[in-house]
Image (spheres, grey):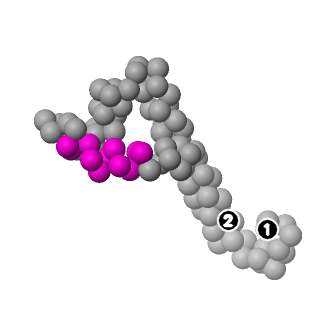
Amino acid sequence: MVILMLAMHLAGALGRAILPDLTIPDQVISTLMITVLLPFAAGILLASSMAAIMSTINSQLLQSSATIIKDLHLNIAPEEIKKEKKLT
């Protein structure tokens, strides 16, 4: 997994040397994968990066929703802060 992360970072940093005519820098990784790798391997790597993005967004949404609900609940019922077991 560490090797894959290092390869992704190096591909992003050195992608300009391999694809000098690329006009949109945000497309370096996907264009490099499609150009260099077999279609099956490119599909797996693109799907794995999308899975990592979706996992990160999921955890951020879960944390933000818990924070918002806790803040709203404590503003509506401030006496509940003394009941720690019920609050958690």
Instruction: Give the vertical position of 74 relative to 5 (above or below).
Output: below
**Mark 2 burial class by Cα count in 10 Å: few <14, some 14-19, many 20+:** some
Residue 8 in view in this figure: yes
Considering the numbered disc 2 on the image, is that residue within a helix, a strand or a loop? helix
Q: Quadrant of residue 32?
A: top left
Taking the spot 78% from the left edge, 73% from the top edge, the residue there is 80
Query: In the rendered picture of this protein, how many numbered marks are placed on residues?
Result: 2
Task: Classify residue 84 as left or right of residue 33.
Answer: right
Task: Classify residue 75 as left or right of residue 7.
Answer: right
Q: Please tell me the numbered disc located at residue 24.
A: none
**Mark 1 burial class by Cα count in 10 Å: few <14, some 14-19, many 20+:** few
Q: Who comes first in sequence, dot 2 or dot 1? A: 2
Q: Quadrant of residue 35?
A: top left
User: Label 2 vs label 1: CA separation?
Assistant: 8 Å
Contact, CB < 8 Å: mark 2 with mark 1?
yes
Taking the spot 53% from the left edge, 50% from the top edge, the residue there is 2
Taking the spot 32% from the left edge, 47% from the top edge, the residue there is 12
Image x and y of residue 20, in percent: 15, 39
Residue 53 in view in this figure: no
Image x and y of residue 24, in percent: 20, 40
User: What's drawn in magenta, residue-wise?
Assistant: 7-17
Image x and y of residue 15, in percent: 26, 43
Tell me the amino acid under the disc marked 1: Leu
Q: What residue is disc 1 on? A: 87
- Which quadrant is home to the N terminus? top right
Instruction: Give the vertical position of 2 relative to 34 (above or below).
Output: below
Considering the numbered disc 1 on the image, is that residue within a helix, a strand or a loop? helix
Instruction: Give the vertical position of 3 relative to 84 (above or below).
Output: above
Tell me the amino acid under the disc marked 2: Lys
Q: What residue is disc 2 on? A: 70
Task: Classify residue 50 as left or right of residue 76.
Answer: left
Q: Is residue 28 magenta?
A: no
